[in-house]
Amino acid sequence: MFHLIATLIAAAVAGYIASSFLHTSLSLGMTIVLGLVGGFVGSFVLGLIGIHGSGLIGTTIVSTIGALCTVWIAGKIMK
């Protein structure tokens, strides 16, 4: 249960980091949702090549990579 909560928090933080890094004008709610989606995308894609995040920091890094991709794509679609 703790792992799920930690993953959700890490993904939400990752969405905020990705949005700040990419300077998007998305709302905070949309940023958090895209961070959550990006967290799952990052875990899936990096898991395919054998990279897994462990612990809060590893999960946040993997989630941030996925969130960067997801926020970037959403920014291009929303324009």
Image: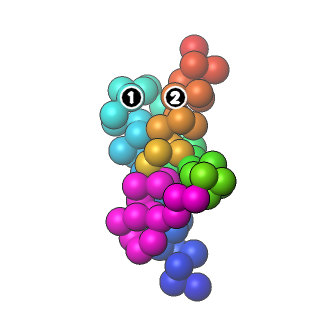
Q: Nearer the viewer, residue 62 or 11?
A: 62
Horizontal and vertical percent position of residue 22: 38, 29
Horizontal and vertical percent position of residue 18: 41, 40
The answer to whether residue 26 is above or below residue 9 is above
Horizontal and vertical percent position of residue 39: 55, 54
The answer to whether residue 67 is above or below residue 36 is above
Q: Quadrant of the C terminus?
A: top right
**Tag 2–tag 1 contact (CB < 8 Å):** yes
Q: Which residue is mark 1?
A: 22
Residue type, mark 2 in image: Trp
For the record, the magenta segment spans 50-63
| Element on which disc 1 rests | helix
| Element on which disc 2 rests | helix
The answer to which image quadrant residue 10 occupies is bottom left
Q: Is residue 4 visible?
A: yes
Q: Which residue is mark 2?
A: 72
